[in-house]
Image (cartoon, coloured by chain):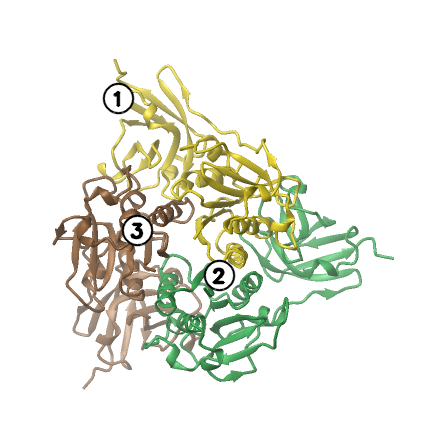
Chain colours: A yellow, B green, C brown
Amino acid sequence: MPILTLTTDFGSKDGFVGTMKGVILGISPHVEIVDISHEIAPQGVREGAFTLWRAYAFFPLGTIHIAVVDPGVGTKRRAIAAQVNGHLFVGPDNGIFTFIINHPIYRESKPEFHHLNNHKYFLKDVSNTFHGRDIFSSVGAHLANGVPLSEMGPVINDPVLLPFTKPEKTDLGWKAHIAYIDHFGNCTTDLPASRKDNPDGISIQILGKKIKGLSTSYGDHAPGALIALIDSEGFIEIALVNGNAAEYLGASIDDIVEIINTKPKR
Amino acid sequence: MPILTLTTDFGSKDGFVGTMKGVILGISPHVEIVDISHEIAPQGVREGAFTLWRAYAFFPLGTIHIAVVDPGVGTKRRAIAAQVNGHLFVGPDNGIFTFIINHPIYRESKPEFHHLNNHKYFLKDVSNTFHGRDIFSSVGAHLANGVPLSEMGPVINDPVLLPFTKPEKTDLGWKAHIAYIDHFGNCTTDLPASRKDNPDGISIQILGKKIKGLSTSYGDHAPGALIALIDSEGFIEIALVNGNAAEYLGASIDDIVEIINTKPKR
Amino acid sequence: MPILTLTTDFGSKDGFVGTMKGVILGISPHVEIVDISHEIAPQGVREGAFTLWRAYAFFPLGTIHIAVVDPGVGTKRRAIAAQVNGHLFVGPDNGIFTFIINHPIYRESKPEFHHLNNHKYFLKDVSNTFHGRDIFSSVGAHLANGVPLSEMGPVINDPVLLPFTKPEKTDLGWKAHIAYIDHFGNCTTDLPASRKDNPDGISIQILGKKIKGLSTSYGDHAPGALIALIDSEGFIEIALVNGNAAEYLGASIDDIVEIINTKPKR
C-alpha cells in the first residue's frame, strides 16, 4: 500500500483537504494518506518547504508527497513532479521543495524533475484556483497507482529554488539565524550543533538576551529559563522551559543568533 | 473498502472526533475514514451544510457522509439517513443536507430519506448530548457494512431545509450575496459565473469598494489588489491577492455583492 | 488490522504528528492510525490524561494508544508501556495515564506496566527533544506488529499518578469541581450524575450563578440560558445554550460547583 502525504496552507475549516482526499481515493482506493500540515501560513512557501523537509525522510522510501502552498495557482508558474532521495514529490514549481533538494539527508540517485503537462492525469475540468484538487491530488494518486514519473511530462532541470540564510563563521564563533518557530515557540536555528567548536564553552546571544552553554533537555532547568539545546534534527534551538521562547523574545524568522566560543578548543 | 467522511463542529481539541472513529472502526474495521471539517463554527448548521456540499461530490459514489452540527441533540428533532445523488448521508434533520438536496451536481436517482429510529443500529446507551458518537457513527458504520438504508427506519418525505439567499436579477446585472468565507478570507458569492452577461464588461460593488472585470487567477495582480475571479465551483469570488479580503472589507455571510454589466452584450 | 491512536500537545502546524505517522507506517504498514487530539495545551499533562481517558474505551480491545505530552523529554523521567483494561498504552511516565488507571470503566485483568528500556525497539538515533518520534511511535508500531509488552522492558509497579479533585459530600449535597472545559465552553464536573439524591430537586451554584434543576438536553431551553445537564460520560455538566458557558462564567479547571438538594428524598 503506497503512502501519500499532504502539506498545504489550506487550514482545516473549509473542507479543501477532504476534497483532495476524495479525489485521491477515487483514483487510488488503497493509498494510505497522511497529513503533514495544513496550517502552513497562507502563501507561506518557505514555511511549507521547511516543514515538509523536516518530516519527509521519516516516511518509507517511495512515499509520494503532495505540497500545495501556491499563491501562483492559475498563472503560468509550472506544476512539477520530482524524485529526490527515493521519495516522490508533486506540487507547484515555486520553491516548495527547496530544502529537500538542497539539504539531502541521504542520496540514492540524482534528483529528477518533470513539468506536469499531461492532462490525461489531471481532473477533466481544471479550475484556476484549486490545482491542489484538480492537478496535484490527481497526479499524486496516479503515481501511487504506479504510473511512472516520465508519463507526467518532460524532464526539466531548473526547478525554482528559494533563497535562504546560511550560518556564517565569525571571529568569535558563528552568526546563525532563526530558521523556524514551532507551535511551542521553540526557535530552531540554521546552525548544525556539530559545527560548534566546544560543547562546554559557548554562549549564545539572541535579541539582547544571553544564554550560557547548551542544555541537554527542556526539563534540565526550572520553568521560565531561557535555554539553548540541540533540536531533533541536530540544529541549535532556543527554548523557554514550559513557555514560549518566540513570544518572550519577540523572535521572527531570520533573526540573528550569535554563537560565541567562550572557551575555544586548544 | 467503503469511504466514510465526517463533518462536525466538534473542533480538534477534545477528542470527540477520535471517539467517533473508535466507534466506527469497532463496527466496521475496514472502512476508510476521511475528515472533511471539524472546524465548522459551533452550531453553524448552514456553514456545515455549505462545506459538506462543496466537498461531497469529489468522493466516489457510495461514500457515506456523516455530518454532525447538532444544537438540537437530545430534543425531539429527528435523526436521518439519506441517499442523494448516489451518496449516503447520516445526521440530524436540521437542514445540514440542504445544499446537497437543492444544488444537485448530478442526479442518478430520486433522493430517499429515512427517519433513524431503529435502535438496533445505535450504541447500547444513547446519551442526550453526543449522538455523533451514539447514533450517527454507529449507523454510518453499519451502512458501510452493507446494511440497507431501509433497515434504519421509515421513509420520510419532509427533511428540514434551510432558507438561503439566491442571486436576483437587477436592471444593471445581478444582486448576489456572500455565500461563504474561507480561511484565506476569500468571499464566494451565490452567483454562478456562467450567469454574467459579458465576461469582459462587468464591474462589481461590494461594501463600498469597486472591482473592474474578472481576473483569471490570484497571481495576475500585485499583492494587495482586490479582485474578482471564478472560484473552484464556478461561482464569482472576491479575493485580496496574498491577503484576506473578508478582513479588508469587513465582510460577512449574506452581504450584498452587486454585479453590474458595464458593456452589455448586443 | 490493529488500531493505534495518538494524543499529543504537538499542534497541527509543525508536521511533528505527520513525522510520527511516517515512523509508525515504516515499521507497521498495515496499522490504522487515529488522531484523538493534538491540541492538548502545551505541557498539559492532566488535560491530555482526561482527553485520552474519555475517548479510549470507545476503541476496540487491543487498540494501542500513544500519548505524548512530555515536558520532561530527555530527562531521567521513565518511558512506559502499559496494558490496562484490555488496551495498550505507550508514553512518558508522568501521569498521562492517571485517569485510565484510576477510573476503570471495566476491568479484564490487572494493569501491567513496563519501563521502556529496550533500545532494540527505538529508532537508531534517539534525540533528547522528540521521543514521540524516536521512542513512542517506534515502540507503538512494534506492539502493533505483535511484539509482546514484556519485550519492551522490565515490569514496574509504581507508575506516576497525578493528583486530581474528587467531589465531596456536604450537608446540603455535593461540592464538585470543573474537571474539563471543551471547545464549546461546556464545563464538565467531577460529579457523576448518579450520585445526586433527587433528580427533580437540586439547584447548582457556580461562580455566583444559580441553576435550578437538571435539563434533559441543550435544546430544551432558549439560546443564552445557563443550564446543567448530564454529559455523555454521565457526569453533571454546565452549559450555555448555543453559547460558551466557560467564557460567560469566567470558569477554570478545578473551580467549585455546589450541588444543593432542594427537595431531599424522603
Image quadrant holding the N terminus of chain B, namely bottom left
Chain at numbered mark 3: C
Say if labels 3 and 2 share a chain. no
Q: Is residue A76 left or right of residue B38?
A: right
Residue B124 in picture, x, y percent from top left: 32, 77
Q: Residue A130, can we see it? A: no
Q: Amino acid at mark 2?
A: Ile
Mark 3 crowdedness (10 Å alpha carbons): few <14, some 14-19, many ≥20? many
Going by the numbered disc 1, the residue's amino acid type is Gly
* Category of crowding for the residue at label 2, using alpha-carbon neighbours closer than 10 angstroms: few (below 14), some (14–19), many (at least 20): many
On the picture, is A18 further left or further right than C115?
right
* Numbered disc 3: secondary structure: helix
- Which residue in the protein does label 1 denote? A201
Residue at (81% x, 53% y) in the render: B262
Q: CA distance from mark 2 to mark 1?
A: 52 Å
Quadrant of the frame with the C terminus of chain B? bottom right
Q: Are marks 2 and 1 on the same chain?
A: no
Crowding at dot 1, Cα within 10 Å, few <14 / some 14-19 / many 20+, comes out as some
Identify residue type, mark 3.
Ala
Say whether mark 3 and mark 1 are on the same chain: no
Secondary structure beneath dot 2 equals loop
Seen at 28% across and 72% down, the residue is: C234
Q: Which mark is residue B40?
A: 2
Residue C145 or residue A12, whichever sits in front: C145
Q: Which mark is residue C111?
A: none
- The chain ID associated with circle 1 is A
Please provide percent x and percent y for residue A109. 47, 33
Can residue B166 be seen here? The reply is yes
Mark 3 → mark 2, Cα distance in angstroms: 33 Å
Place of residue C94 in the rendered image (x, y in percent of width and height, measured from the top left) = 21, 50
**View extreme (right): residue:** B266
Task: Say which of marks 3 and 2 sits in front.
Answer: 3
